[in-house]
Image (cartoon, rainbow, N blue to C red):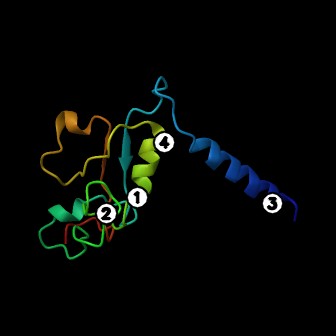
Amino acid sequence: MKAVPDLLLLSVVHVIDFLKPVKAKQTAVRALFVFGDSFLDNGNNNYIEDCDLKSNYPPYGVDFPLGPTGRFSNGRNAADILAEHLGIPDYLPVFNNPQNKGDRILHGVNYASAGAGILES
């Protein structure tokens, strides 16, 4: 039974080491592309007309500097935190926003959508 605690400890150490902030001179990660459901959605469903799974109204975003954006949280989500730790500047853009093309997605884009459906319906 000793192997299980050692394995768990090893995993925790790797996660902690992975989440250390990247120094400004390190540019190992240039972009982050996020896929997922409501845990990572940053507003993709706002641009799907017939979608009922939206969170672009209070109380969502009560602790987020930009207010309610479509994140299903009161503040930053896991993708925002990971991007910050990897040294990605700003917040990842929303894929479904028609303005997010070209240079606006150089550091990655967030494809996550609440409901995690592959079809817009």
In the picture of the structure, the residue carrying the numbered disc 2 is 71
Name the image quarter holding the N terminus.
Answer: bottom right
In the picture of the structure, the residue carrying the numbered disc 3 is 5
The answer to whether residue 5 is left or right of residue 33 is: right
Measured along the vertical axis of the image, is residue 45 above or below residue 100? below
Sequence-wise, which precedes: disc 4 or disc 1? 1
> Distance of mark 1 from mark 2, alpha carbons?
7 Å
Residue 29, picture quadrant:
top left
The answer to whether residue 2 is left or right of residue 109 is: right
Q: Which amino acid, mark 1?
A: Asn
Instruction: Name the disc covering residue 85, or none.
Output: 4
> Distance of mark 4 from mark 1, alpha carbons?
13 Å
Q: Which amino acid, mark 3?
A: Pro
Q: Which amino acid, mark 4?
A: His
> Distance of mark 2 from mark 4, alpha carbons?
19 Å
In the picture of the structure, the residue carrying the numbered disc 1 is 77
Q: Position of residue 61 (x, y in %)?
A: 31, 64
Measured along the vertical axis of the image, is residue 35 above or below residue 92? below
Q: CB atoms at circles 1 and 2 under 8 Å apart?
A: yes
CA neighbours of label 4 inside 10 A, class few (<14), some (14 to 19), many (20+): some
> Distance of mark 3 from mark 2, alpha carbons?
35 Å
> Distance of mark 1 from mark 3, alpha carbons?
29 Å
The residue sitting at 36% across, 46% down in the picture is: 33
Q: Which amino acid, mark 2?
A: Arg
- As helix, strand or loop, the secondary structure at mark 2 comes to loop
The residue sitting at 68% across, 53% down in the picture is: 12
User: Which residue is nearer to you in this view: 26 or 115?
Assistant: 26
Name the image quarter holding the C terminus.
Answer: bottom left
* In this rendering, the label closer to the viewer, 1 or 3: 1
